[in-house]
Image (cartoon, rainbow, N blue to C red):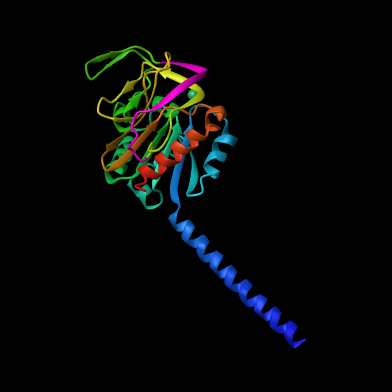
């Protein structure tokens, strides 16, 4: 009996120790997680698989931010609670005050990942193309002395993606790949953005992904990602995850 009690005691002690250790691990990993504010709205998408992709990112915790309802969050205070904003919204214009607050936040520094149709957001706010380095053109216009006609898109295309920058942390070690996704063309891209991915698809402009700085913020624009078929491509989630880490400064 004494023997049995000592076994039970030993088991209890080791169980408590294991519980304490796993609690510590949980605390440590929670602290290390990259805190993401994820905007969406203004364009339909398959919500369940989209959010599931973020659920699967072990080093990311995120908050859903429907737009434009959450637009008031985009101000300097946000950097106390979040490391990165991932924008998948395509909202129209915000107020001048909201625009100024967003610029002030970026000037102080926060990661920004702009994804797919976010290129078409804030269509009348010229500063937004300077922030992301891209713009989907809805009406013919002139930017920096160059004339643009309307941008186009085509669903369900098979695209070859070439890793143009083999040294950047977002693309280093990746191989060229193919993806079934939507193409865009005739969009504006900033001449001095650093291009990471390109395509030779005839219905798409060559530049697919790029990075640049805006204020004290790192910005990553990634054109791919129309639907669950694209998100299911392991390259997509890998590049998105790396983009989040890189803009967070990790
Ligand atoms: Zn799309």
Question: What stretch of residues is rendered in magenta?
Answer: 152-169
**Magenta: predominant secondary structure element?**
strand
**Is 50 positioned to the left or the right of 99 in the image?**
right
**Is 18 positioned to the left or the right of 144 in the image?**
right
Outermost residue toward the right in this view = 1
Nearest to the observer: residue 151 or residue 207: 207
Asked if 136 appears above or below 211 in the picture, the reply is above
Residue 187 painted magenta: no
**Is 6 positioned to the left or the right of 103 in the image?**
right
Please give the name of the residue rendered at 37% of the width and 39% of the height, measured from the top-left corner: 112
Q: Quarter of the image holding residue 7?
A: bottom right
Q: Is residue 98 visible?
A: no
Nearest to the observer: residue 135 or residue 13: 13
Q: Position of residue 216 (x, y in %)?
A: 27, 43
Please give the name of the residue rendered at 59% of the width and 68% of the height, measured from the top-left corner: 19
Q: Is residue 201 visible?
A: yes
Please give the name of the residue rendered at 45% of the width and 19% of the height, measured from the top-left corner: 183
Q: Position of residue 120 (x, y in %)?
A: 40, 24
Q: Position of residue 65 (x, y in %)?
A: 48, 40
Asked if 75 appears above or below 40 in the picture, the reply is below
Quadrant the N terminus occupies:
bottom right
Residue 157 painted magenta: yes
């Amino acid at each position: 009996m004494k023997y049995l009690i000592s076994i039970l005691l030993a088991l209890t002690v080791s169980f408590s120790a294991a519980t304490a250790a796993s609690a510590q691990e949980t605390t440590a990993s929670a602290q290390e997680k990259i805190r993401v504010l994820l905007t969406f709205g203004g364009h339909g998408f398959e919500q369940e698989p989209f959010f599931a992709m973020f659920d699967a990112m072990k080093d990311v915790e995120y908050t859903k931010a429907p737009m434009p309802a959450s637009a008031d969050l985009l101000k300097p205070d946000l950097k106390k609670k979040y490391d990165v904003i991932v924008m998948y919204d395509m909202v129209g214009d915000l107020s001048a005050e909201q625009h100024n607050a967003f610029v002030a936040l970026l000037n102080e520094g926060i990661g920004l990942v702009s994804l797919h149709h976010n290129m078409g957001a804030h269509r009348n706010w010229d500063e937004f193309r300077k922030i992301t380095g891209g713009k989907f053109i809805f009406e013919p216009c002139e930017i920096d002395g160059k004339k643009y006609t309307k941008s186009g898109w085509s669903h369900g295309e098979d695209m070859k993606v070439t890793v143009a920058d083999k040294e950047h942390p977002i693309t280093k070690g990746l191989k060229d790949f193919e993806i079934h996704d939507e193409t865009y063309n005739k969009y504006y891209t900033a001449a001095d953005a650093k291009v990471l991915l390109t395509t030779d698809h005839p219905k798409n402009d060559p530049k697919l992904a790029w990075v640049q700085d805006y204020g004290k913020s790192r910005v990553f624009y990634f054109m791919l990602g129309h639907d669950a078929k694209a998100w299911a491509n392991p390259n997509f989630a890998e590049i998105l995850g790396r983009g989040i880490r890189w803009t967070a400064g990790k």
